[in-house]
Amino acid sequence: MNKETSTPKAMTIWGIGPRLILLAALYSLPVAIAQWIGYPRFLIQGVPDAVFAVLGSALIAIGIPIWIWASRTVDSAYDEDLLATQGVYALCRHPIYGTAVCFVLPGVLLFFRSWLLLAIPLAAYLFCRLLLRKEEDHLRRKFGAAYRDYEKSVPVLFPQVWKAVGCFFYPLPTVRLEENVLAVRDGDANMFLYTDGRHAVAIDAGYSAKGIAKELRQLGVDPASVTHLFLTHTDFDHAGGLSLFSRAQIFLSQAEEQMIDGRTARFPGLYRNPRISRPYILLQDGDLVTVGKIRVRAVATPGHTPGSMSFLMDEKVLFTGDTLRLQNGRVDTFYELLTMDREAQKKSIRKLAALQGIQLLCTAHTGCTRAVDDSWKRWR
């Protein structure tokens, strides 16, 4: 039930959900009666039971997690009067309805091996498309151009599960965000350049030198112009392109050194971050580095890794690496499976939320926001 789409007068909190359930029930009842009376006439023959069981289980296993995620996302969006377009809402515009009609319902009915019963999800899909016209009109009126742009690139109902990576990682394209801030995309990650017109510093180094070099050519930037490179942490998607910036002095948190000197494994028993062969300078929380007119303040934000560090440029532009993620304009913790200490990360986010005067907040995998004060609402 797409609760972010409603207002008290225009639409109830449940959207089209009650009407969809009623129509589906009215249609399903005679179909179920016909199935009971005509059994086993409508059984699909020649296909082993195991095929239906595996396929049905797979559809349910895909649909239920998406349904739960969508429900939680839309609850938050509705409470704050936001349009949900990121996370699970990158799969389709109405994932609650979509997963129920396209995955969970047919998954359950597959266990009955009846071609007659499989007509129920088809009818539910058609009912849903019909009823959604009103909800879509309401969204266009409420969110205007933002929703019209969203509907151009995202399907209405059937979740594009093959695009699942885009639910979690949605970096900016390579672009000049401000006169002095450039986002550089490498795969599912952004690194950033910050300049005062004469000096340029980099925040992180992407996956690979080759990928970053290609994007910098697009911006007309010579990698040799970067004199200082600040690592938010040393995971391969942030430090993989260090060789491109051969003239840059490298900076990282002192607490992060354990991740590259063999003391601490990134994933115990599986993987350790590679060493950095060049000299580097270690930073403590609150350290200030001046590069021309640029003032870089180090802010220790452990959690994703023990030495994760955010960097505040000229007290107004904040680069957070993987300390947090942005989803639908709000700050949330980074993904738990990739975070070494979730409680420490929450403390780090609250620490950043206390900073004042930030005009631009940039993450490594989930874009940037200029509505910084609004993004911290959950944490202040």
Image (cartoon, helix red, strand yellow):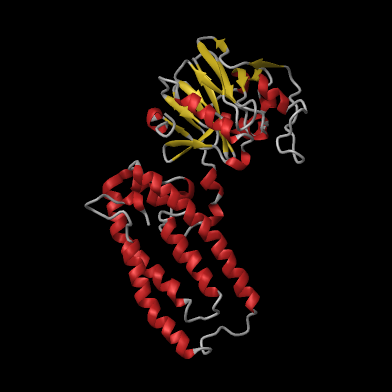
Q: Residue at x 52, y 32 (%)?
A: 363
Tell me if residue 350 can be seen.
Answer: yes
On screen, residue 289 above or below 348: above
Spot occupied by residue 98 in the image (x, y as percentages of width and height): 44, 61
Tell me if residue 144 can be seen.
Answer: no
Q: Residue at x 63, y 78 (%)?
A: 49
Judge from the rendering whether residue 21 lies leftward or rightward of residue 289; answer left or right: left
Q: Nearer the viewer, residue 105 or 184?
A: 105
Spot occupied by residue 92 in the image (x, y as percentages of width and height): 44, 54
Spot occupied by residue 373 in the image (x, y as percentages of width and height): 38, 28
Spot occupied by residue 176 in the image (x, y as percentages of width and height): 47, 28
Quarter of the picture containing the C terminus is top left
Can you tell which quarter of the image residue 248 is in?
Answer: top right
Task: Please identify the residue farthest to the front as the structure is shown.
Answer: 343
Quarter of the picture containing the N terminus is bottom left
Q: Residue at x 66, y 32 (%)?
A: 235
On screen, residue 307 above or below 161: above
Judge from the rendering whether residue 361 lies leftward or rightward of residue 281; answer left or right: left
